[in-house]
Image (cartoon, rainbow, N blue to C red):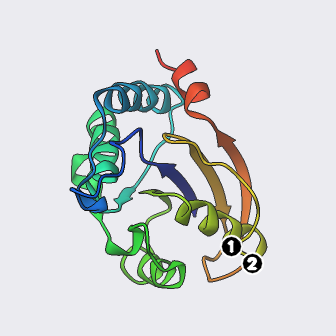
């Protein structure tokens, strides 16, 4: 399995008046994500599934990617990808519901995604890394399980992906 991990694009600031799950992409975040999605498209990456957190900012990020790639029917949502998600439950869901998918994009939040990447690479959740808003990571995995099971193929910043835009 190739597992692609995409952090949501630039979102509204935290506000006591609005639940975290309701924060949307800013206009700048949406514009940058459209450019990132076109950069991903120009790399000729192919995906079988886009699985996203249902929080608005991740959902909007995933929708932009799906629309750009013509993958609207391959877009699904999982509560296992919310900010407070549990990596063990996410891995179980991937193995149970999506085991036939070979190229999966996960769209979610920090620090959860970095912790997940760290877990799959090292078996620990504490590798220091910075997955920027709109950043994308590719892991290759023989058999997905909780713990060390992945190899880092590449890690791209949003600016790098926008530079691939055609």
How packed mark 1 is, by other alpha carbons closer than 10 Å (few <14, some 14-19, many 20 or more), is: many
Q: Position of residue 154 (x, y in %)?
A: 70, 45
Please give the name of the residue rendered at 61% of the width and 35% of the height, measured from the top-left corner: 157
Q: Which residue is mark 2?
A: 123
* 43 to the left or right of 23: right
Against 91, residue 136 (above or below) is: above
Q: Position of residue 28 (x, y in %)?
A: 35, 26
Q: Is residue 148 above or below residue 108?
A: below
State the residue at coordinates (54%, 53%): 4
Quarter of the image for residue 17 reads bottom left
Circle 2 residues within 10 Å: few <14, some 14–19, many ≥20: some
The local secondary structure at tag 1 comes to helix
Q: Are marks 1 and 2 in contact (CB under 8 Å)?
A: yes
Look at mark 1 in the image and give the residue it sits on: 119
Q: Residue at x 52, y 58 (%)?
A: 110
Residue sitting nearer the eye, 67 or 31? 31
């Amino acid at each position: 399995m190739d597992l692609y991990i995409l952090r949501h694009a630039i979102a509204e600031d935290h506000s006591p008046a609005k639940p975290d799950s309701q924060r949307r992409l800013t206009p700048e975040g949406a514009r940058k994500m459209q450019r990132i999605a076109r950069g991903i498209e120009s790399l000729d990456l192919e995906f079988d599934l886009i699985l996203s957190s249902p929080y608005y900012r991740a959902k909007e990020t995933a929708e932009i990617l799906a629309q750009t790639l013509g993958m609207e029917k391959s877009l699904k949502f999982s509560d296992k990808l919310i900010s407070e998600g549990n990596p063990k439950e996410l891995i179980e869901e991937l193995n149970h519901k999506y085991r036939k998918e070979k190229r999966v994009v996960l769209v979610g939040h920090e620090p959860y995604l970095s912790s997940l990447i760290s877990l799959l690479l090292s078996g620990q959740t504490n590798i220091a890394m910075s997955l920027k808003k709109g950043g994308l990571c590719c892991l290759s995995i023989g058999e997905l399980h909780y713990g060390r099971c992945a190899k880092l193929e590449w890690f791209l910043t949003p600016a790098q992906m926008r530079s691939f835009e055609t």
